[in-house]
Amino acid sequence: ACSVNVAGSIAMGVMTEPPSTENASKEVAEQFAEEKEKVLKMLEMKAKMAMEVLRECKNVECKAIMGGLYALSLIHISEPTRQAEISYAVFCLKKKKKKK
């Protein structure tokens, strides 16, 4: 027989029907809204940081991150870099660290 995962059920319930003044107290609904806003701001900040690092790499194009958490970049890899034993992203990050 299957048993219900209580923690999973609670998490799924919160995701599909987040606290609002209709189904929770005003304080709970406000706290949820504040926490959600903080998380979204933090994710936006991290996405911008990733985009900035990618844009600093030579031969990398990265479009502005809008709404998603994925930085889609186009990498132009030169022949010497292709022959190296490391990825181009690691090469860029190591190069950036050396500049500091």
Image (spheres, rainbow, N blue to C red):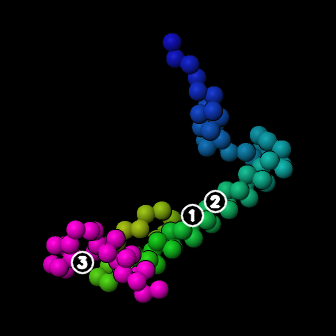
Query: Badge 1 is on which residue?
Result: 43
Q: Residue 37: x and y, percent?
A: 67, 61
Q: Residue 99: x and y, percent?
A: 42, 87
User: Dividing the picture into quarters, in which one does residue 61 lie?
Assistant: bottom left
Query: Is there CB contact under 8 Å for labels 1 and 3?
Result: no
Among numbered discs 2 and 3, the one appearing first in the sequence: 2
Mark number for residue 13?
none
The amino acid type, in three-letter code, at marker 2 is: Val
Closer to us: 46 or 17: 46
Q: Residue 3: x and y, percent?
A: 56, 19
Mark 1 secondary-structure assignment: helix
Give the residue displayed 77% in from the left and 49% down from the top.
29
Give the residue displayed 84% in from the left and 50% down from the top.
27
Query: Badge 2 is on which residue?
Result: 39
Vertical comparison of 6 with 34: above or below: above
Is 85 within the magenta?
yes
| Magenta span: chief secondary structure | helix
Query: Badge 3 is on which residue?
Result: 76
Closer to us: 14 or 3: 3
Marks 2 and 3, how far apart at CA: 33 Å
